Image (cartoon, rainbow, N blue to C red):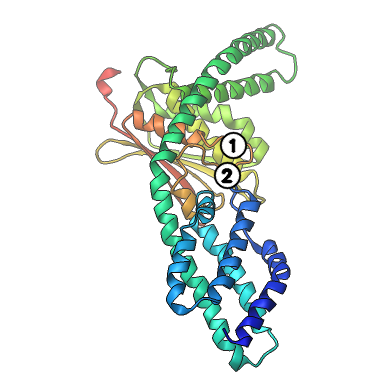
Amino acid sequence: MDQLKFDVISYMESRQEFIFKRWKEKIIVPIEQDRETMIKGGHLLFKVMLHAFSLPKKNLESYLKLTAEDTEAKIIYKTSSISYIIYNANIIKNEILIEIAQYRAEWEDIKPIYIKFSDIIDQFLFNVTNCYNDVNEETKPLTEENHEERLTLLGQMTSSFVHEFRNPLTTIHGFVQLLRSENPELPYMDIILNELEQLKFRITQFLMLSRKEVLNHEITLFSLNDLLDQVASFIYPRLLEANVELERELEDNLYVNGYIEEIRQVLINIIFNAIDVLSEQMKASVIKIKGYKNEDESIVLQTSNTGPKIPEPLLNTIFNPFVTTKKTGTGLGLFVCKEIIEKHNGRLSCTSDDDWTTFTIQLPPAQMQEV
């Protein structure tokens, strides 16, 4: 290795602290990963780059491949998505190249070194991408199995806890109703009852997750129009609080065969999610519900809101368990909704653009002879 290359490596080692100080201010760390693990990945890239630069060309490719497959690197792959890895690696690449470009030498002399450093990092990231795909393909079945285990455990915990919690809540709800009937002049009783209803709704959500309780043991034929009237009355206080306008455009005589309480659960959950999103924005907010029959008599119900566009990566996983953007969310609401709709032989999907985010429920034609 000639003297200039040796001097550049020594210079880069001396500038390491400054490079990482700037890098740490710019990196993006995913929610599920701790910052220290991501920083460890940056230091690994820096170490690999300096050592690779000192190697002869014949050894370079095998070294970069083996390093990408190293146990230390695999730990990082398993705790982050490839998009974050590549993004943050490119930031440190830029910081490194900036330092090289500023080295005290003529540009014609430093240019080959600049290009070699860039090529080394690109080759290493290519190997990282291949190894990342291999590692995550190996762990995919395990990840799915863990999801099932977590759901089973959560179902057992919530089933036992929520049953105990619901008994005193039912008693409180009954006495509040009695108190209101005997003292209709008392203020705030409607508010108290509405809050209790919402609490019962949340409890119901967890009970449905446990899969040990069917809320309505009999499949009935019910009017979706009437059900939406009930849901609109239930959510009205939340709409007022969040300053959200509700618009409805429903064809007449929309009937559904199924468990009415479960469908109610789906509608309330989707609308509550929309209200939560819309309450965080300053512009005018609208939730639009549109219901109609397809040519095959299947029922389509679309719930749209004017909230921000859902990013494509999140849109692809939005119905998966434990996926949420809320600080206090469980990531189970939409998962439960999809399970309910599919149990009714229907489909639940979501689309999102800059104007509208729309959840579409499609249910099979109702058997009208059961009326």
Residue at 43% x, 27% y: name it.
263
- Residue 325: numbered disc: 2
Give residue 57's position: percent from left, percent from top.
46, 79
Residue in the foreground of this view, choosing between 228 and 345: 345
Looking at the image, which residue is at 60% across and 92% down? 109
User: In the rendered image, which residue does mark 1 sit on?
Assistant: 329
Left or right: 316 with respect to 330?
A: left
* Circle 1 residues within 10 Å: few <14, some 14–19, many ≥20: few
Question: Which amino acid type corresponds to the residue marked 2 in the rendered image?
Answer: Thr
Please tell me which residue lies in front, 230 or 95: 95
Which secondary structure lies at badge 1? loop
Quarter occupied by the N terminus = bottom right
Q: Quadrant of residue 158?
A: top right
Left or right: 81 in relation to 175: left
The secondary element bearing badge 2 is classed as loop
Q: What label sits on residue 213 in the rendered view?
A: none
The answer to whether 19 is drawn above or below residue 83 in the figure is below
Q: Position of residue 45 (x, y in %)?
A: 57, 65
Query: Dot 2: few (<14), some (14–19), or many (≥20) neighbours within 10 Å?
Result: few
For the C terminus, the image quarter is: top left
Looking at the image, residue 165 sits to the left or right of residue 155; the answer is: right
Q: Residue at x 49, y 72 (%)?
A: 122
Residue 357: horizontal and vertical position, in percent? Answer: 49, 48
Q: Note whether 82 is above or below 159 in the view shown.
A: below
Q: CA distance from mark 2 to mark 1?
A: 7 Å
What count of labels does the image hold? 2
Residue at 59%, 48% (x, y): give it. Answer: 33
Percent across and percent down for residue 254 are 36, 31
Residue 240 lies in what quarter of the image? Answer: top right
- State yes or no: discs 2 and 1 in contact (Cβ < 8 Å): yes
User: Does residue 116 sit above or below 241 in this rendering?
Assistant: below
